[in-house]
Image (cartoon, grey):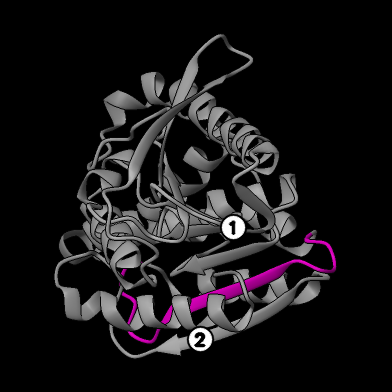
């Protein structure tokens, strides 16, 4: 996803430089229970005298690992990203649902499994500081980051324009398309379609995952004041669930709309807030 690529590029460029040499790129294959191999792309400095903090980026559904192609300078952090096992179409058609349901279920399960395996691998690496592994979920990647934080022991998580209440989120996406032309019929159709799709997919509860985070975990949630992509109720549902957990939760509310990677000036406040928080938490 273009937003994810630009987000990771900017993150890498804003991190303090360790060396001027070109970074070393690695491919880390993760064997999944299905027999499928998930290829993780890693980027690390050529030379380092200390164990590195690690940042894993989960962007949108498209080209997550491709973001690493834009990073050209060594940084004092290990960056990791991978493409999602399943890719959803930009516009969902009813005729595609029978094919997409099993594909999406499998993709969600394999993404969670892959993140748990990647966390284990990073913790075991001699060049990574296991106490400073940060998982960053941006937009559609935020629910996966929330689930992974509950599944594993990630020390820190950043949720950029994240959400819970998946039925409400799906309904909002349908309503944005149907209501302008169909009015109340569009609203009713969005409600029914969202509940049906949610049931067919058997989606996990983001609220339950967020509320189950253990004490000692650190979470930064970044919200946009004028987010037209995520309904306010879904964003508030995520915050409320996080507040019920044992994790330490920090919230940053920023002016502007949803991160889409259209312009660097839109990304800069999010990046600066994330990096400042990581510095305060001594994660970088």
Relative horizontal placement of residue 187, taking residue 106 as reference (left or right):
left
Q: To which residue does mark 1 refer?
A: 50
- The secondary element bearing badge 1 is classed as loop
Q: Position of residue 140 (x, y in %)?
A: 41, 54
Q: To which residue does mark 2 refer?
A: 252
Quadrant for residue 96, please give it. Answer: top left
Task: Tell me if mark 2 has few (under 14), some (14-19) or many (20+) residues whose alpha carbon lies within 10 angstroms of its own.
Answer: some
- The secondary element bearing badge 2 is classed as strand
Task: Give the residues in magenta.
Answer: 213-229
> Of the residues under marks 1 and 2, which one precedes in the sequence?
1
Query: Is residue 16 or residue 131 the one in the foreground?
Result: 16
Viewer can see residue 284: yes
Q: Position of residue 9 (x, y in %)?
A: 27, 59
Kindly identify the residue that appears in the image at 79 percent across and 73 percent down.
244
Marks 1/2: CA–CA distance: 31 Å
Image height of 65 relative to 253, above or below: above
Say if the magenta span includes residue 224: yes
Relative horizontal placement of residue 54, taking residue 99 as reference (left or right):
right
Task: Tell me if mark 1 has few (under 14), some (14-19) or many (20+) residues whose alpha carbon lies within 10 angstroms of its own.
Answer: few
Quadrant for residue 4, please give it. Answer: bottom left
Q: Mark 1 or 2, which is nearer the eye?
A: 1
Query: Is residue 205 or residue 12 the one in the foreground?
Result: 12
Q: Position of residue 18 (x, y in %)?
A: 40, 64
């Amino acid at each position: 996803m273009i937003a994810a690529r630009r987000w990771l590029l900017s993150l890498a460029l804003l991190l303090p430089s360790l060396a001027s040499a070109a970074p070393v790129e690695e491919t880390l294959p993760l064997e999944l229970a299905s027999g499928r191999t998930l290829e993780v792309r890693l980027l690390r400095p050529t030379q380092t005298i200390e164990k590195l903090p690690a940042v894993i980026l989960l962007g949108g559904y498209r080209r997550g690992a491709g973001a690493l192609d834009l990073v050209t300078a060594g940084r004092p952090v290990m960056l990791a990203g991978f493409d999602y096992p399943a890719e959803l179409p930009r516009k969902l058609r009813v005729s595609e649902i029978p094919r997409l349901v099993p594909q999406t279920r499998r993709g969600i399960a394999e993404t969670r499994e892959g993140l748990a395996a990647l966390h284990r691998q990073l913790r075991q690496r001699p060049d990574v500081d296991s106490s400073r592994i940060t998982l960053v979920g941006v937009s559609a990647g935020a629910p996966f980051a929330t689930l992974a934080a509950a599944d594993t022991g990630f020390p820190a998580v950043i949720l950029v324009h994240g959400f819970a209440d998946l039925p409400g989120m799906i309904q909002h996406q349908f309503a944005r398309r149907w209501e302008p032309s169909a009015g109340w019929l569009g609203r009713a159709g969005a409600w029914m379609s969202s509940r049906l799709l949610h049931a067919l997919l058997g989606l996990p509860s983001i609220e339950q995952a967020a509320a189950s985070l253990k004490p000692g975990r650190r979470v930064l949630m970044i919200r946009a004041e004028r987010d037209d992509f995520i309904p306010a109720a879904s964003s508030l549902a995520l915050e409320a669930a996080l507040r019920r957990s044992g994790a330490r939760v920090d919230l940053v509310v920023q002016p502007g709309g949803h991160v889409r990677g259209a312009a660097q000036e839109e990304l800069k406040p999010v990046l600066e807030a994330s990096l400042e928080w990581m510095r305060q938490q001594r994660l970088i």
